[in-house]
Image (spheres, grey):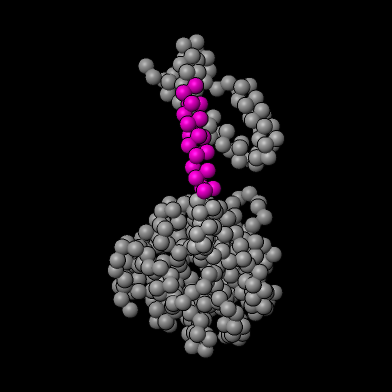
Amino acid sequence: MKKSSGSKFIPLSDWLGDIKKPVVIAGPCSAESEEQVFKTAKALAKIPGVKIFRSGVWKPRTSPHSFKGHGVEALKWLQNVKRETGLLTAVEVASPKHVELCLKFNIDIIWVGARTTVSPFSIEELTRSLEGIDIPVMVKNPLNPDLELWAGAIERFFISGHKKIIAIHRGFHTYEKTPYRNNPIWEIPIELKRRYPQLPFFCDPSHITGNPDFIEDISQKALNLDMCGLMIETHINPDSAISDAFQQITPARLKILLKKLSIPQKNEDFKIVKQLEDLRNGIDIVDNQILNLLKQRMDIVEKIGLYKKEHKITVLQIKRWNSIINERLTLAEKLGLNKDYIEKMLKILHEASILLQHQIINKK
Ligand code: PEP
Ligand code: MN
């Protein structure tokens, strides 16, 4: 296999063949036994849309006492899965040794887990071990919500010649309790997609939710955001799983779940496209008005800054700030606007106003 050249990500359909959205990667968190791997893979191979069989063979466990995977032995099981079911196989790698073994056992796709994406040293070691090798790489987002770290890992693979890359949103660790195991922060993959429009995006609703009951909702959200694939942890008997038992679903449940998803289509019907364009023109006009109003607001802030400087009045006026928050939020509620978003917006406006007034007052 030779590394690909060119300056763009290679579209998924060019290396995965005929695909329909969503492309589904399914399989257990860990390969636990030959029987568990086979029973799961055989059931998955019958589900339309399932193309790739995932399985951890080296597990990055929080506790040193937890099951760490069967390693090479499990790679042999995966080779058989590929031969017997026709599914492609995917394994998580975190070191050059893992890469070497995956290549030796003809694993089709490798992925970098959240705990590895955080480490530029590890990513560089992986790219060095993959030099000259053409194998697709999936890069999960890092544990922490750091867009640049995710982008950096993807770029490290890209500049070392890997163009068959998939980015996977698997949510972010938060110290605060949320309904999810790893909080999805959709703005982050959206911004990454804006920067790299050809990069295929998948979602891992299993690690986001940590709960089978929420997987459908998160999968639907991902599809609504134009993500093209899903990685869903699937186990023939989730209750007996050695890792992530609480979030895995059976192949039967996966099949039902996939059927329930509504798949957005590329709609080229002239009337529909035209109507959307008209609505978007409306948004453009309103956005222009908002920006002009923001300019007017900042001009007034500037005058207030000069006035405060002249009369030696503090920049921060807490009573006024409190009344702004209260009055605007009351109005927002009356208008049926989401108060949390309006509060965030007001805080950004206030921050910009304070900054400008500091600059005015500090200017000699
Ligand atoms: C996994 O997919 O089994 C895994 C460990 O994922 P993540 O890196 O997203 O935690
Ligand atoms: Mn897992």
Q: Which residue appears at 51% of the width and 35% of the height?
A: 290
Residue 255 shown in magenta: no
Q: Which residue appears at 45% of the width and 64% of the height?
A: 200
From the viewer's side, name the closer residue of 307 and 123: 307
Residue 288 shown in magenta: yes
**Magenta segment:** 278-300
Report whether 184 appears left or right of 284: right
Q: Is residue 197 visible from the viewing direction of this image?
A: yes
From the viewer's side, name the closer residue of 268 and 146: 268
Quarter occupied by residue 69: bottom right
From the viewer's side, name the closer residue of 289 and 308: 289
How far across and down, in percent of the image, does residue 343 sit?
61, 36
Q: Which residue appears at 48% of the width and 37% of the height?
A: 288
How far across and down, in percent of the image, does residue 68 sit?
55, 72
Q: Quadrant of the N terminus?
A: bottom left
How far across and down, in percent of the image, does residue 60 sit?
52, 67
How far across and down, in percent of the image, does residue 46 sit?
59, 83
From the viewer's side, name the closer residue of 15 and 267: 267
- Compared with 292, 135 (above or below) is below
- Compared with 102, 268 (above or below) is above
Majority SS type along the magenta span = helix
